[in-house]
Amino acid sequence: MRLYHTSKTEIRQPDIHRGRQNADFGPGFYLTPDREFACRWAGKDAVINIYEFDTDGLQIREFKRDLDWFRYIFSNRNAVDSVNADVVMGPIANDTIYDTLGILTSGLISDEDALSILLIGHEYIQVAVKTEKAAEQLRFIGSETNIDEKKYAELLKKEQEEFRNAFNEIIDRIAGDD
């Protein structure tokens, strides 16, 4: 499996212990099989690190965009990782996750309504390498630095505008249900 990781530097030896502890799938080294997605988040002077990943012999947990996925992300955002696996794969939660979870914990919306917010927009897949065993099977094969930053910034801006519009429609519907 070919995977990509965006950074400010070339990363030949991924470190599963760096990064946020309360990310979508808990601590780990995050990648995506979608090169275009990696480029969208690259920004100025970014490096797209490219890896081949051999998943043989690894325990993998794969999520779909559903309530199990939502609840797993919710628990990880509270620093409670409930899955024991070498690798966790599944959709990326959109950038409103903190707002959505804040609204949910306040009791203003249900899990189902929060999930409907998280389902807005394109589905991008992330792969969290969570154990040293899995990291050893991730082979660095190169990096790219010639990313068309302007092109991807425009695509990201358009996607964010579409997201905001859909988000507002769902919030209006939820508010109207009360």
Image: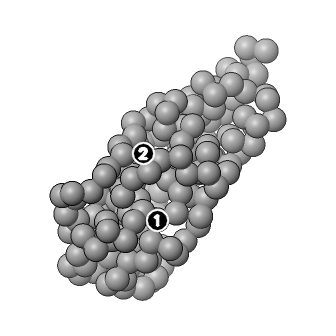
Is residue 51 visible from the viewing direction of this image? no
Judged left or right of residue 135, residue 99 is right
* Amino acid type, label 1: Gly
Please tell me the numbered disc located at residue 106: none
- CA gap, disc 2 and disc 1: 15 Å
Q: Secondary structure at mark 1?
A: loop
Of tags 2 and 1, the one toward the viewer is: 1
Judged left or right of residue 118, residue 148 is left
Q: Secondary structure at mark 2?
A: strand
Please tell me the numbered disc located at residue 28: 1
Quarter of the image containing the C terminus? Answer: top right
Judged left or right of residue 31, residue 117 is right
The x, y position of residue 151, in whole percent, is 39, 65
**Label 2, on which residue?**
91
Residue drawn at point x = 37 percent, y = 71 percent:
132
Quarter of the image containing the N terminus? Answer: bottom left
Mark earlier in primary sequence (2, 1): 1
The x, y position of residue 168, in whole percent, is 66, 33
* Amino acid type, label 2: Pro
The x, y position of residue 153, in whole percent, is 47, 64
- Packing grade of label 2 (10 A; few <14, some 14-19, many >=20) is many
Q: Nearer the viewer, residue 139 or 141?
A: 139
Judged left or right of residue 144, residue 157 is right
- Residue 8 lies, with reference to residue 68, above or below; the image says below
- Residue 44 lies, with reference to residue 172, above or below; the image says below
Residue drawn at point x = 46 percent, y = 82 percent:
8
The x, y position of residue 22, in whole percent, is 61, 58
Q: Nearer the viewer, residue 46 or 65?
A: 65
- Packing grade of label 1 (10 A; few <14, some 14-19, many >=20) is many
Q: In which quarter of the view is residue 19 placed?
A: bottom right
- Residue 121 lies, with reference to residue 21, above or below; the image says above
